[in-house]
Amino acid sequence: KAGVTQTPRYLIKTRGQQVTLSCSPISGHRSVSWYQQTPGQGLQFLFEYFSETQRNKGNFPGRFSGRQFSNSRSEMNVSTLELGDSALYLCASSLTGQGNVYEQYFGPGTRLTVT
Amino acid sequence: GNSVTQMEGPVTLSEEAFLTINCTYTATGYPSLFWYVQYPGEGLQLLLKATKADDKGSNKGFEATYRKETTSFHLEKGSVQVSDSAVYFCALNNNYQLIWGAGTKLIIKP
């Protein structure tokens, strides 16, 4: 079974621009989550989607948004990029996200650099 | 609120040494607990998990036991290898998200 795929793997953008990152979950997985990883803040939760519905959102400004499509693929968008948005963005998928098990499988990440 | 605290790194050991990486948590309810590993330049890989008190998760020689009385989930391995060098993250799940420790960098010297 193919793992979680993320595109692009690397991205360089300029302050003020916007960016869209894509994630394809493991086949059959309906829950997709996004995390931001930086050396200073570590791993921080952005949002989680299940069957096209956002079930939880982390403490990020409204410039960060996401969505999930009917085939479970997900995108996240960051508008008006700031230097501090430079990070590794990780996508994770889970079978259902139900109950307390919630085992997540991660993609390789998209490395975003804002200049 | 819910939180995870890990021992600070880096942890440097010689090959074949015994490894312990401490992880304690604060949580309401009964979350599942996880250890993930991140090799340089890669995403996170699930190493092991435990879903209830006294459960022991194990994988690739690593073990961790869910201790409710001490709110701990320490990672152990009896004999580490150079290939185990990576960053290890302890996490718990809450409300459809994983809450992470800061990560512990492990360096194994031949």
Image (cartoon, coloured by chain):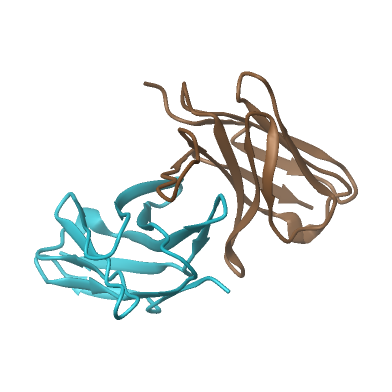
- Residue appearing at x 27%, y 72% in the figure: B67
- Residue appearing at x 43%, y 67% in the figure: B103
The image shows residue B81, relative to residue B107, as above or below, that is above
The residue closer to the viewer here, B34 or B16, is B34
Quarter of the image with the C terminus of chain B is bottom left
Tell me residue B28's x, y (percent): 49, 70
The residue closer to the viewer here, B67 or A41, is B67
Tell me residue A55's x, y (percent): 66, 44
Tell me residue B86's x, y (percent): 34, 58
**B5 to the left or right of B108:** right
Quarter of the image for residue A58 reads bottom right
Chain B colour is cyan
Quarter of the image with the N terminus of chain B is bottom right
* Image chain in brown: A
**A105 to the left or right of A73:** left
- Residue appearing at x 44%, y 61% in the figure: B92
